[in-house]
Amino acid sequence: VAEKKAAAERKSAAEKKAAAERKAAADKKAAAEKKAAAERKAAAEKKAAADKKAATARRASDQLKAQSISKSKSVSEVKRDKRTQLFTVSVSVNTAKIATVVSIGVIASAVFVAALAFIAR
């Protein structure tokens, strides 16, 4: 009877110890998750503050630029300058070269048509 009682007490103590270990592990995991969430929130707030500061600085510089430029430029030119452009393309047309190429093409096509007409007969 005493052995059964002692075995039951050992089993109960082992169960209590296991439950305490599980609780400690769960508490540790919860603390780690809470810390990670706090770090993510702090990083997000820091990024938002940096973005806001950059936007404010950009807006202020745009206003200063617009004020200094508006004296000499029209409204449409100011709007054009405010737009973000990926790239600009400049095209120059040399009409003499184009006329030469077109005339060579016309002459060549006339020669080919004449040759086809000669062969067809």
Image (cartoon, helix red, strand yellow):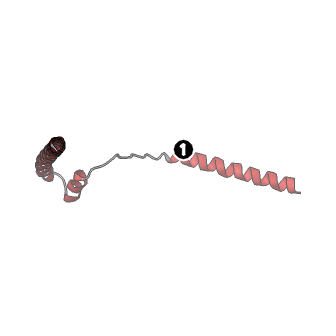
**SS at badge 1:** helix
**Residue at the right extreme of this rendering:** 121
Q: Quadrant of residue 77?
A: bottom left
Q: Is residue 47 visible?
A: no
Q: Residues within 10 Å of mark 1 (few under 14, many from 20)?
A: few
Residue 48 pos. (x, y %)? 14, 49
Name the residue rendered at 56%, 49% in the picture.
Answer: 99
- Whether residue 110 is visible, yes or no, is yes
Please tell me how many numbered marks the rendered image carries: 1
Answer with left or right where residue 121 lies relative to residue 5.
right
Residue found 53% across the figure and 45% down from its top: 96
Quadrant for the C terminus in the image: bottom right
Relative depth, front residue between 13 and 91: 13
Q: Report the residue that reaches farthest toward the front.
A: 1
Residue at 60 percent across and 50 percent down: it is 102
Residue 105 located left or right of residue 17: right
Q: Amino acid at mark 1?
A: Lys
Residue, disc 1: 97
Q: Residue furthest bottom?
A: 75
Give the residue displayed 72% in from the left and 53% down from the top: 110
Residue 21 point in image, percent of width and height: 16, 41
* Percent position of residue 94, x then y: 48, 45
Image quadrant where one finds the N terminus:
top left
Residue 47 position (above or below residue 121): above
In the image, 26: left or right of 95? left
